[in-house]
């Protein structure tokens, strides 16, 4: 058992964790930096969200306040744009960018944006796969039977579903940011020089999803290396 817990492939896990930590630190630092820059419009995050939704012809989505920091999200099940403490009542260019970004997801939902629909369909599969992948793989590794290879392959397939979810998330997030910047500009909410700062905030936020996808791919590569090594030994 020690071999599987201390094998060299752990370096892939470490690399993935470091990438995620760097991305997380960057988005927090960038958001905090531009949270100090008040927008000239004087609008807060909640007001911007309402403005963007109405401009997009969306009247069945509510804007709500949620506790926490950067816990902002759009919930397609309840059709709510949920804005966190540093965004809901804040008037900074960072807060307005985040609020508009979440409305970007609401616009995607209203327009049946294909990648968003695919990601929503993948949610239960990805959750199921990420939860069961390692137990299934370990069963295949520990019990040397004729069906071990098949069990391992099932485990890899389950984890691959979680990786696919991360990959599909990328175009969804980048598109939401693009829609947000267009709305902020066309609605006159932010000036061009302010949009430059908002774009930096949204870009750093998008990089956290890129980091998560990279970490998931590295983890999948590690699983494949471990299982292939076991098969060669057998």
Image (cartoon, rainbow, N blue to C red):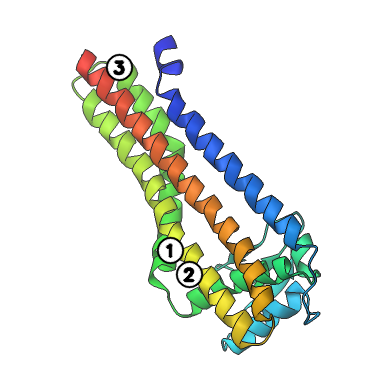
From the viewer's side, name the closer residue of 175 and 156. Answer: 175
Which numbered tag is attached to residue 119? none
Precedes in sequence: disc 3 or disc 2: 3
In this view, 183 is above or below 133:
below
Quadrant in the rendering for residue 228: top left
Q: What residue is drawn where x is 45% and y is 58%?
A: 169
List x then y, in percent, for residue 175: 48, 69
Residue 49 falls left or right of residue 77: right
List x then y, in percent, for residue 26: 64, 49
Residue linked to disc 2: 175
Cα–Cα gap, marks 3 and 1 = 40 Å
Residue linked to disc 1: 171
Q: What residue is drawn where x is 52% and y is 70%?
A: 176
Residue linked to disc 3: 143
| Residue 157 visible in the displayed image | yes
In this view, 97 is above or below 222:
below
Quarter of the image with the N terminus is top left
10 Å neighbourhood of mark 2: few (<14), some, or many (≥20)?
A: some
Q: Residue furthest left?
A: 146
10 Å neighbourhood of mark 3: few (<14), some, or many (≥20)?
A: few
- Marks 1 and 3: in contact by CB < 8 Å? no
List x then y, in percent, for residue 54: 63, 87
Q: Residue furthest top?
A: 2
Choose mark 3 or mark 1, whichever is in front: 1
Cα–Cα gap, marks 2 and 1 = 6 Å
| Element type where label 2 sits in the image | helix
Q: What residue is drawn where x is 46% and y is 40%?
A: 215
């Amino acid at each position: 058992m020690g071999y599987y817990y201390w094998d060299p492939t752990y370096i892939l896990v470490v690399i993935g964790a470091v990438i995620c930590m760097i991305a997380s630190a960057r988005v927090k630092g960038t958001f905090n930096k531009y949270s100090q820059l008040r927008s000239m419009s004087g609008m807060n995050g909640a007001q911007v969200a309402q403005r963007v939704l109405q401009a997009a012809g969306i009247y069945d989505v509510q804007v709500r306040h949620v506790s926490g920091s950067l816990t902002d999200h759009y919930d397609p099940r309840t059709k709510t744009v949920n804005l966190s403490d540093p965004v809901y009542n804040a008037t900074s260019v960072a807060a307005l960018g985040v609020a508009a970004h979440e409305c970007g997801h609401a616009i995607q939902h209203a327009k049946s944006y294909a990648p968003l629909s695919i990601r929503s369909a993948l949610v239960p599969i990805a959750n199921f796969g990420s939860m069961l992948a390692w137990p299934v793989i370990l069963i295949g590794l520990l019990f040397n039977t004729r069906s071990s290879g098949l069990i391992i392959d099932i485990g890899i397939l389950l984890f691959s579903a979680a990786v696919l979810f991360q990959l599909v998330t990328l175009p969804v997030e980048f598109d939401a940011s693009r829609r947000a910047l267009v709305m902020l500009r066309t609605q006159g909410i932010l000036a061009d020089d302010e949009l430059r700062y908002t774009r930096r905030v949204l870009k750093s936020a998008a990089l956290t999803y890129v980091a998560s996808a990279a970490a998931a791919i590295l983890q999948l590569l590690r699983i494949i290396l471990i299982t292939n090594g076991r098969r060669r030994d057998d």
